[in-house]
Image (spheres, rainbow, N blue to C red):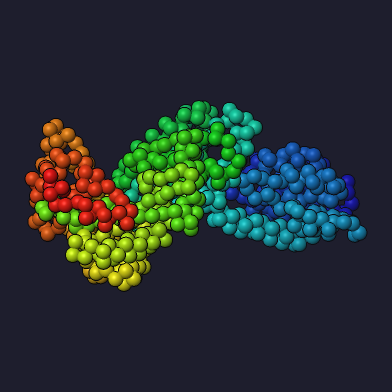
Amino acid sequence: MTSPDKGVESAEATSPARPRPQPAPRPSKRRLVMLIDSNPDVHALVELQVNDLHAHVYHTYSLSDALLRMNDYSPDLVLVDHQLLDDDGLDSLRRRCSRPQARPPSIVVLTGAENDRTPFLAFDPGVIDFLRKPLRANELRARVRAVLQTQGLLSRLEHQAAHDRLTGMLNRDGLSPRVDAAITRFKVSPERHFAVLFLDFDNFKRLNDAYGHDVGDDLLRQVGLRLRAIARTGRLMKDANYEPAVARLGGDEFVVLMEDLSRPEDAEEVANRLIAALGREYWINGMQVTSSISIGITHGSQSYSCAAEVLRDADAAMYEAKAAGRGCYVVFNSQLRQRIEMRARTERELRLAVEARQLSLAYQPIINLDSGRLVGLESLLRWQHPELGCVAPAEFIPVAVDSGLIGPIGDWVLAKACADFRELQQQLGENAPDFIAVNISRRQLTDPGLPAKISSALKGSGIEPQCLHLEITESELVTDLNTARDTLREIKKLGVALSVDDFGTGYSSLASLYDFPIDVFKLDRSFIAADLTSERGRALMAVTHAVLQLARNIGVRVIAEGVETAEQLAVLQSLRCDMAQGYFLGRPMPAEQVLAWSRATSVEKVNS
């Protein structure tokens, strides 16, 4: 037995003849201290003082036993006699104390020697302090209490840093290590399939704006509760007791990490269950709120190296689900990766194109169907790539909008179109068209500086405000009604005319459109593209007639788009449509060709 002067300093200590009974591993609420010391008197003192702090003690007399039991007991604090440690022993203890998803325990070294290297151990990684033997009861209790309190505070701070404040779920910082660990396990054991489901509520911003942020927060909390309740996959998992990790990354974006799937395809079954369950109504403050969700899925088989790559691809698949109609899921695959890479390449080269002035404008004639006169031009953006040739607007304009490039490009288009129109006015005189139409994206519409930019373009070119028509696609106009309404009213004060492009393809109500200061409806080409002798064609003509009558009643003019045949033109004239444009009437052309085209095109030619 070790002598008392090298062990404890306490009359209360006793010397048991055999190891003391051990507590059950990791009590649910009480903190746990692991004591590694060969002196039974030390065990007795620590047991007494730690119990007084409402903590448990796991006693072991050897380092080898402690290393063996470390993972089972997961202690908060390790008290270890320096005589049981050599350099290898301390390294082994530090390694076993390391935990991938939790705080490692603090290590305090106990020493009875006066001249040893113990004080220096306190500066090694994982070792926070040392205690001199013989141990003093008050000092021991104070040190243990301080360490456990610090551990508790750090654990709470780390929990807050890794969890979402609103829902209590993991956040991005808390989820990423879990995903990284799943990637590592999958590389070692490919049969351990995992999948990540990226969820986003459709039209959540509209709900938030309509009912207020408090209601939006309550909805997100309810989503979190419902998601946690249904995320357990049961029979889909090899371990029926395993619960997938669920996280909220911010806003209305949620993520489910599923590991050890029986089959990779099982993630799709879970996605269907989530779409059905999360799409049901929610009751908040007596109001019924509903919204569908879109889900992107990616699997570990995509050869990922880090969590950021997994979340990136799952997010991309989610946006594909939104583009596919919302309320569905899309699985990330090689084809989607190619589209994303192509989109990234387009964005890079589009940035270079702006700097290299590869962009240009073409102008398509707009004809008055009563007189046959050229009354307007629509400016259309073109990109002449040095290697790919002419890039279709449908390929690069969405990229410009999403990347933010539409801002500087839109400013240039506005100024260039106004300048070209002014020059055309000077060349054609009284035969010049009445207006120039410029398309405005939703991103530009949310720019508070847009009215000032329009005013600057008008002053810089010298054209009258009524000569400028701004075209906004119907679907983009109704995305954010309040913002659009306020911005358009400010623009309208400048004297500029406003057109709704692709009218009839969006989801706006006529009442909401009537609330905007709209001057022109541009009827989508789909209304006249059908066979006019078919039942569908006749039905569309009836709708067209109704739209034209409505427009006349509210004082709005109509331009029909996509006129490609004489028959279509004749029908529009019989319906008394105001204006039209299309390849039959005139193709888009550079500004320098408009003058010659205008002089060569007579009223008789258009009406013939």
What residue lies at 45% left-to-right and 57% top-to-bottom?
A: 357
Where residue 485 sits in the image (x, y, percent)?
A: 26, 62
From the viewer's perspective, tell me whether residue 445 is left or right of residue 367.
right
What residue lies at 84% left-to-right and 51% top-to-bottom?
A: 82
Q: Against 496, is 291 above or below?
A: above
Where residue 189 sits in the image (x, y, percent)?
A: 62, 30
The front one of 360 and 575 is 360
Q: Against 153, is 196 above or below?
A: above
Q: Residue furthest right?
A: 115
Name the image quarter holding the C terminus: top left
What residue lies at 12% left-to-right and 36% top-to-bottom?
A: 538
Where residue 176 sits in the image (x, y, percent)?
A: 56, 46
Q: Against 193, is 17 above or below?
A: below
Asked which quadrant contains residue 180, the reply is top right
The front one of 165 and 349 is 349
Q: Against 160, is 257 above or below?
A: above
Q: How many marks?
A: 0
The front one of 408 and 84 is 408
What residue lies at 24% left-to-right and 44% top-to-bottom?
A: 583
Q: Is residue 164 visible?
A: no
The front one of 570 and 488 is 570
Where residue 395 sits in the image (x, y, percent)?
A: 40, 45
From the viewer's perspective, tell me whether residue 45 is left or right of residue 494.
right
Q: Is residue 565 visible?
A: yes
